[in-house]
Amino acid sequence: MAHADAARRELERELGSDEVLADPLALRLYARDASMVEGSAALVAFPRSPTDVVACVRAAARHGLSVVPRGSGTGLAGASTPIGDALVVVTAKMNRILEVRTEDRLAWVEPGVFNLDLSVALVPTGFTYAPDPSSQQVSSIGGNVNTNAGGPHCLAYGVTSAHVLAMDVVLQDGETIRVGAEGPEAPGYDLRGVVVGSEGTLGIVTAACVRLVPLPPAVRTMLLDFDTVEECAGTVSDIIARGVVPAALEMMDQGIVRAAERFAHAGYPVDAAAILIVEIDGTPGAVEAQQAEVVAAARAHAVRTVRVAADEAERALIWKGRKSAFGAVAQIAPHYHLHDCVVPRTKLVEVLAGVYAIANRHDLIVTNVFHAGDGNLHPLFSFDRNVPGTLERVLRASDEVVRLCVDAGGALSGEHGIGLEKRAFMPLVFSDDDLAAQACVRAAFDPEGRMNPQKVLPDGARCGDFAVARAGSADAADAAASLPEGTWI
Amino acid sequence: MDLKHPGGVADVAEVLRDASGSGTRVLIVGGRRHIDRGNACEVDAELWTTQLDRLESYSPAEMVAVVGAGMRIGDLQAALAGGGQEWPVDAPDDATVGGVIAAGVSSPRRLRVGHVRDTVLELSIVTGDGRQVRSGAQTVKNVTGYDLHRLATGSLGTLGCIVRVALKLRPLPKACATLVTEDGGLDVGGRLLEHVPLPAAVVATPNAAYVRLEGFPEEVREQIAAARSVSGGFEVHDEERFLSPAPASPIVAEAAVAPSRIPRIVEGRNRWAALLGVGLTWFGVDDEPALAALRRGVAEAGGVAPVIAGPGGLGDTPLPAPDVHRRLKDAFDPAGILAPGRFWGGL
């Protein structure tokens, strides 16, 4: 039996009454993240310190509430959507950069620090924090860590996991553990590695020690445009095959180019079928050598024009179009559903063709802007959910996109995570034993299942004797049918 | 000592299932190149992985290879070189892929190529009780469930037998060079780290420093010029291989501390090689009392110093979250047959 009122009184005493919300409007606001799934919250708390986080977790345990960690709420898979009697622990007010030690190439930050704020703060040091999700202006390091966030520059620099050295994590019983180390190796199993990307199901990160990398001496950004999507995607594979790993390799199709151009005025060629943004960095000599290879690959695929940013302002403008693309689609229709799946990059052309066919079949508008170098697709369906029947078509199309990517040898998510939206698909890519082993990892951290329950793993995945009652919903007609009770789209 | 040399994954599963049933303690063995890592442990049988040696798929355009865990590093690198690529680990040719991953051994070129754990995209293990479990995906990015492959990497064969992995590769550098100077150790090394753009490694020893450079030919020329601005007295070598610069000694310990603490832990010592900017320092020590003294100093600097060659094990640094560790071990090796005691915390 949950006692939200008692938990509220206790937390008001410990955190201060301003840091605890239980009014209907707040509960409604925090009943969802940036996904389409809505749930319900019993209580919302805003810790300002690790001690406050411990108080939250203990109060939740005492009063029978589950704990749902939340950063900026920009998650797209529903991992921060609360279900039932849940205490939402919002880390947004823990937003200090604690220390920057360039001599150790690391920085300690609180989880609520915005990704971009960290990069900006680091500029004078000559170092940077490499992961740069497109949401970086508003998404927090804590959220990035929990989704193992990517971003355009992960092609060359690696995803968030490669940039997190250590974390302080509050477990479900209020114990704080440090996983990883400031040094290059840590004793024990790599708990750090499983906490990264665990979507708030193993504990609450109260501080992260992130790795700093030197800013490259030279950077060059190029915009290439093509008459066909096929030639554009073919250029991606060709660049890699030539032994060049650009810092970023981003592709946008015509629909998204037009929307982004109207918004950002970046000078994108709106008549092209697709464009590539290629960024290369390194020493000046390395940049020249890579540029020659990139241009040769593009010419072999009938590139129309090669635009090289002449200065920092032009470079920023090219990126502005890309990074604001998801905002720009508001011009197309009032709602959108953004997908995230990864395929082998040599399958990009065939999967993209499949995505367009699915959209046609369901009479939906789809645009694509994605991390082509990583094979990380982001098909985006634009729609108006007030038109009866549209949402259902979007959900059916989404289901088909997931299966298309899995059939091409891909993964369910490249950087957004599984959360609620994709957990029913997990049996498509993992066996019963795989899922049971994953349930064991979760149970090792949280034996009582209090941290963000019902996320990531499908119903029926249990540790125990590894026996799993397979979640039959993987074959259900659409994802909506497989959401846990108490949540809805 | 019983010896098992399974020919396939199903055989590995059968061996471990039987061993769990009978309480037979098993040490998983690849190329024996990292066998000294971990605490001394008594076992009844060895399970050799070297027949699981197939390159199952390799696509240069994907920069991904799927290999059996018993494949020898030399064989793998030779196959990848055909596609102009490498798995950046710099382990001996007769080490195995699974052994390198289980031991968690990264390349000394880590400043440029990263930690070995970040190259393991997908991994299949057979657990102590013979279940086959896979995690990750054969794509360069993936957030799909819990990353068991992170736990297996560096687990010294105490959670399961790694049988198959998908590896993230990188292009072979088009040029490389190693610059060596006898001009001074830490001081020169520190300046190289500061002034040479994007080196693969900067190593300091008590009286020498060297820097490993690689990339495009133009890039390496620029790096050499930058290094010469630090010290005039470099000898340039252009060997392709860059192996661990650890000193030869009856016992070699690998200390891991935050990079700025290297000067503190090497003070007063005369057999070491430090990877600057990374924080690894290899120490040659003669005996266990000397090792214990070294470990005290490293612990005071906030680090650990497991032995990588010779006797001495991992050291007695307490595990963080021992309960979490114990539950993980129990879940993956319920009968406790996999190299009992070899891992940190006596797991």
Image (cartoon, helix red, strand yellow):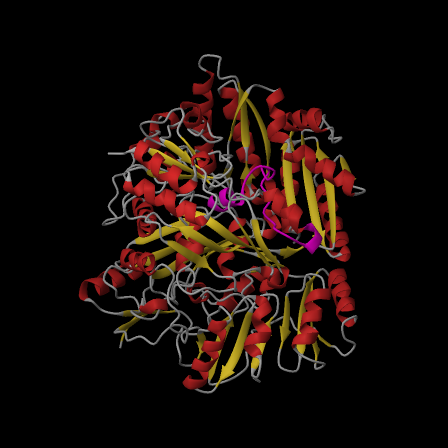
Quadrant of the drawing holding the N terminus of chain B: bottom left
Q: How far from the left and from the top, in percent, is residue A292?
A: 76, 50
The one of A222 and B330 positioned closer to us in this rendering: B330
The outermost residue toward the right is A310
Residue under the point 36% across and 53% down: A175
Q: Assess whether residue B129 is covered by the magenta stretch.
A: no
The one of A306 and A38 positioned closer to us in this rendering: A38
Quadrant of the drawing holding the C terminus of chain B: bottom left
Looking at the image, is B39 positioned above or below residue B137?
Answer: below
The outermost residue toward the top is A388
Looking at the image, residue A228 sits to the left or right of residue B136; the answer is right
Q: How far from the left and from the top, in percent, is residue A133?
A: 58, 41
Q: How far from the left and from the top, in percent, is residue A288?
A: 77, 52
Looking at the image, residue B315 sits to the left or right of residue A131; the answer is left
Looking at the image, residue A278 sits to the left or right of residue A77; the answer is right
Q: How far from the left and from the top, in percent, is residue B175?
A: 70, 64
Q: Write the start and end of the magenta stretch as one range.
A: A123-146
